[in-house]
Image (cartoon, grey):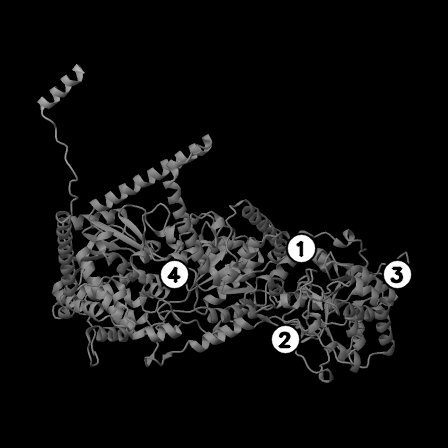
Amino acid sequence: MGSLETGIPLKRDNLFRSFSSVRTERHPFSQRPRSRFSRFLLFKKLDYLQWICTVAVFLFFVVLFQMFLPGSVEKSGNSSLQDNVEVSSGDFKFLKEMGVLDFGEDIRFEPSKLLDKFQREAREAILYSPAFNRTKQRFSYRKPQLAMVFADLSVDSQKLLMVTVAAALQEIGYEFQVYSLEDGPVHDVWRTIGIPVTIIQAFDKTGIVVDWLNYDGILVNSFEARGVFSCFVQEPFKSLPLIWTIHERSLATHSRKYISSGHIDLLNDWKRIFNRSSVVVFPNYILPMIYSTFDVGNFFVIPGTPAEAWEADTVMALHKDNLRVKMGYELEDAVIAIVGSQFMYRGLWLEHAIILQALLPVLSDFPLDNNSNSNLKIVVLSGDSTSNYGVVFEEIAINLTYPSGIVKHKAIDVDADNVLSMADLVIYGSFLEEQSFPEVLMKAMCFEKPIIAPDLSMIRKYVDDRVNGYLFPKENPKFLTQVIRQVFSNGKVSSLARNIASIGRSTARNLMVSETVEGYASLLVNVLKLPSEVAPPKDVAEMPLKFKEKWQWHLFEALSNSTYINCTLRSYTFLDKFEQQWNNAPKDRPLSADDGPFLYSIWEEEKNIEIANARKRKEEEELKDRSDQSHGTWEEVYRSAKKADRSKQDLHERDEGELERTGQPLSIYEPYFGEGTWPFLHLSSLYRGIGLLDEMSYYIQSHMYTWTGYLQSTKGRRPGAEDIDASARLPLLDNPYYRDILGEYGAFFAIANRIDRVHKNAWIGFQSWRATARKASLSRIAENALLDAIETQRHGDTLYFWVRLDLDPRNSLQLDFWSFCDAINAGNCKFAFAEALKRMYGIKHDLDSLPPMPVDGGTWSVMQSWALPTRSFLEFVMFSRMFVDALDAHMYDEHHSSGQCYLSFSKDKQCYSRLLELLINVWAYHSARRMVYVNPDTGVMQEHHKFKSRRGQMWIRWFSYATLKSMDEDLAEEADSEHPTRRWLWPSTGEIFWQGVYERERKLRHRQKEDRKQRSKDKIDRIRKRTHQKVIGKYVKPPPEMKNSNTSTAVLN
């Protein structure tokens, strides 16, 4: 049927493949629908001469069109654009058989899969949990937080659009933070509307120190900001809602070059970026079709952009001289530009031919020049510079009896701005009902040109006839002749037409602002999954009208003198530079995007290969001394020696770090999940990382961006650091479900499991990487103060903490403990806690009260940043294991099967992690531990919830060591003796010890000792009872006399 504007044919199954649906109806032959254009030709009683002329022109050039017609689609199999159009027998059946009558009516982009996803999630986001008979509550204590990421802050139309959207969304309750890879003049614009700006460095991995989890969603603008995606493809930021807005066409053009040149890995790398985005937003309906190669079902269109008005203003400012002379036209000429749809379909030439035929009668209205040539000039702006459309169309003009030189063709990708800026009148010559207002018509209006267009519904929505433009009935092109004569008077544009053009420019400069703002507001509602403490945004109808009527031009007026930046040229330059970096990078390429389901088998194969290689190396070492060895070249010997020195040095450094940790009273562990957290971890001997990412997950993740030069590590741990692998110490963490739902408690259980093998200090601490990101981690002064308090035993058995509840951004209203817990858990924290305690302690009746956490002027610990004596830590883990097991038994079935959790408004992999975040406070308060806050900056300490204020408040019997130890031994005895077959979490969270285990181990040692004694005794008995062979004979030495006698006898003889 037709190709896109790029002039490269695209097939239907490529344009709308997989997820972008096309509305195409098929009927039996007798019931096939008539196209609008054919109905217009057949039933609107066209003038007979007009009819004959049109058909004659077509028949004359049908062969020529078959050979040269641009935008034709090659037929492949049974699927192509052409095959999806059905024309009935009355609609020029002979034209259909020749394959040239096609008017693009079935070209539509519908994000069907994305819309279905939104509807499905809306149905799932119920406020009631039927499995537990619980209603979810929203507390609205803070506004939704959004981060906007840009490649730079230069002055262009994209920044104008996003400034307008951000200013409008602020009015309905959103808060923004802008991040940019480079600074620029728009920095001041953002600050003017009250949005802070941060400049980040994307290509230095250690330089991206942004905790993206602080935001409910990310908006990335332009593919030039892809450097930031190195964060978003790594844990723990992989699940954040991310909206990526793309305005440029250059990547789509380069993608075809990647395919033709064989750069499939580079193409797949871009596909992974598209796949990571929750939604990819385009400002018009042509771009998602051009980018169909990258479509994974997340494309979305929010129509509207100030780009056309911006470019028109720029062209008028840069080309103040007359362009007509440069383009070969006289000042007295009346230039009419004919433009059309952005889609190149086969019927477009016929629509333009009809427009030319309607212009033919007005040719005589224009005066002749000295050479008897008409002052009327017609420019057909269509196609691209590589097509043959111009040759074909000029032949059509000759056959319509136009004098030579009047009708010319210009390529839209080369001369669009020049033609539109010099034209006196612009006629839209396409009858295709498009999904949004045609951009070429919008740009013509921005150039302050009178426009004439058919009364299509999308055009009629924004253009009022004889107010800001001219309309003519699409069924009656003859009316177009009358409209043109109204526009021109004595060969010049009339004053009325100029006034209409002036009004049209004002309209076009702010066209579709409301659609853009409302589109982003609606998209955010569908994409964002707001926690229960976050206030939902207001309805878009409550937004003040002034934010939906105009782009924020006034904020950019002071920047009008800034250097003009060609965005198209800049995007091509970026892609060329990026491609060069790719080619110069190591050839360890990422896996294909289609290999995701097979990664586990690949990992298993890799593991088997490593085992085979290790066995082979062992055999070679055993045979090393038995065969001649080649010494190699001096370079190889030198390289091996340097490698050995480095290994020795690394080993020496590790030994020193281990010695330093052994000699200090405290060791602080920093749990982390993925490479995205590495910039927030410490490297001093006081701290030690513990990675929660298992080997398989890291293998998948690490093979995505190996070409960027990121250092590889073992199982997701930092290279050169002595991080602990949590999954190796606790196999439960190999299960992704429990790794996600336990969060940092997985690190607690992993350290406590046979703790003497990894931790040999009297005190143990933990610090969340998010505390470092929030600048709430311990400073060097605070570290020394904490170590001094521990060494001097200033407070005894104490919980030291340094991230406090009353300073948490989620607690802006300074709520008490249980109210805050309810606020971050959809109003069901107290219910979940009570249910867990009932199961944990075996209480049959309803638990009417909870362990009190009184408001006594003190504060509580959050974000798992605290320190305890190691003995007390093990007691806390003993309590936590039983509490988590009770929670799991209560919530596993519903959460594991459906993903729904009554502690969250949406599907949440970390269902009760927010409840566990506060558990340390309940245990410390009711087990009679002192609670001391350490100021992370100054190290000043302050005790909270002193024992005097706790009298009568603590549930000591419930949280005493004796009670917990007895319960722990009962569970251990059941797990060790009965071996229950039911699903049970507790045995998998740590060690199993009870008195029976000690007795069994004692008996085992005694039995082993007795076995050794018996084996020794049996050996001795075997030696004693060993049979000896009898002597066969003896040699008797003769006496000396006999020897002398024999000698003498021998002499005499």
Kindly indicate whether the residue at mark 2 contacts the one at mark 1 (C-beta within 8 angstroms). Answer: no
Real-space Cα separation, disc 3 to disc 4, in angstroms: 71 Å
Q: Residues within 10 Å of mark 4 (few under 14, many from 20)?
A: some
**Badge 1 amino acid:** Val
Q: Are marks 1 and 4 in contact (CB under 8 Å)?
A: no
Disc marking residue 550: none
Mark 1 or 3, nearer chain start? 1
Name the foreground residue: 379 vs 993.
993
Write down the residue under mark 4. 214
In front: label 3 or label 4:
4
Front one among 536 and 386: 386
Q: 162 left or right of 431?
A: left
Q: Position of residue 240 (x, y in %)?
A: 43, 63
Provide the secondary structure element on which disc 3 rests: loop
Q: Earlier in the sequence, mark 3 or mark 4?
A: 4
Kindly identify which residue carries mark 3: 368
**Quadrant of the image for the N terminus?**
bottom right
Foreground label between 3 and 2? 2
Which residue is denoted by mark 1 in the rendering?
A: 315
Is any part of residue 846 visible from this angle? Answer: yes
